[in-house]
Amino acid sequence: MNRALIIPAAGRGSRLQSDLPKVLYPIAGRPMLDHLLDLYAGVVERFVLVVSHEFEGLVRDHCATLALAGRIDYTIQHRPDGMLPAILTATPAIAQHQPESVWITWCDQVGIRPGTVRRMIELTAGEPDLVFPTVLKRDPYIHFDRDAAGRITAVRHRREGDAMPETGEGDSGFFALSRRAFLEHLPRFAAEPVHGAATGERNFLPFIPWIAQRGTVLTYAVEDELESLGVNTASDARQIEEYFAARS
């Protein structure tokens, strides 16, 4: 098996004013999950959905109606304690299937273009530890600091109260780790108790400068800034629907 995709999908749709789990919130008439499965079905052999106990039944029932149902594993995030714990719940499935590359995407990151996915495939061919697309934008939510050689040295989070530049380089909610980076390096990083200063959550993004000091990290630019838009509010949903319409 070449690739498995982890989709952390335990969140509620409360900011979207919905009673549905966030991953089933409709965008352009279809659940966000369906958009993700369509985008990655041709390049990923296995999907691992990270769900909450509250919504596990709804998500399973929906997926049971899909042609890809037999390619989906489920794992439970018992507490809303951050993306790092959510991703790590997929460890048994990754250890079982042994993919060469472990991809991760946030469940609301539905704007990624096929060209950005193709570029990911190209750059992961040499088995670097981590590959991900970045975006330059004003008033960034996330910003990566780099040294003179271009290596990522730190990550800043507006949500955690960090000082942010006017224009910053952020992620697009789409990552690829080598099997070794996921099964060996990520648990080593997680053993160090690092919590967000404001939220107290354990985020995945600080792993990036950590692994950059120990291995190979490659980045590349997304084709369109809107690829980095996560659907968190009704306004975001409208914006991504307009983006889809313009693309088609």
Image: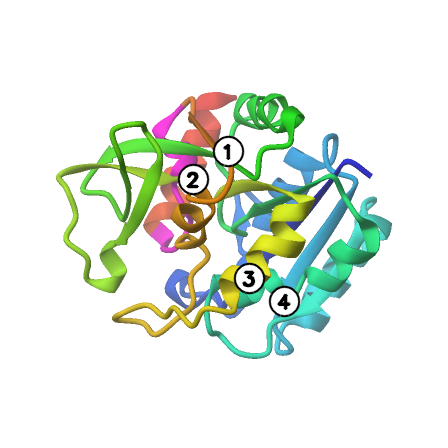
Select label 2 or label 4 by which is in front: 2
The residue labelled by disc 2 is: 172
Of labels 2 and 3, earlier in sequence is: 2
Q: Which of marks 3 and 4 is in front?
A: 3
Label 4, secondary structure: give it.
strand
Q: Are marks 2 and 4 in contact (CB under 8 Å)?
A: no
Q: Is mark 1 on a helix, strand or loop?
A: loop
- Measure how far apart labels 1 and 4 are at the Cα level: 22 Å
Depth check, front residue: 247 or 211: 211
Q: Residue 112 carries which label?
A: 1
Residue highlighted by disc 3: 188
Question: Real-space Cα distance between discs 2 and 4?
Answer: 21 Å
The correct choice, above or below, for 248 with respect to 78 in the image is above
Q: Which of 240 and 224 is in front in this view?
A: 224
Neighbor class of circle 2 (other Cα within 10 Å; few <14, some 14-19, many 20+) is many
Q: Does the magenta stretch include residue 226?
A: yes
Verify CB contact (< 8 Å) between mark 2 and mark 3.
no
Q: Is residue 152 left or right of residue 178?
A: left
| Real-space CA distance between mark 3 and mark 1, rounded to the nearest whole angstrom | 30 Å
Earlier sequence position, callout 2 versus callout 1? 1
- Residue 90 image position (x, y, % from top left): 68, 61
Mark 3 residue type: Arg
Q: Please name the residue shown 25% across and 29% down the image.
A: 148
Q: Give the range drawn in magenta.
A: 224-234
Numbered tag placed on residue 51 in the rendering: 4
Specify which label sits upstream in the sequence, 3 or 1: 1
**Horizontal and vertical percent for residue 7?**
61, 53
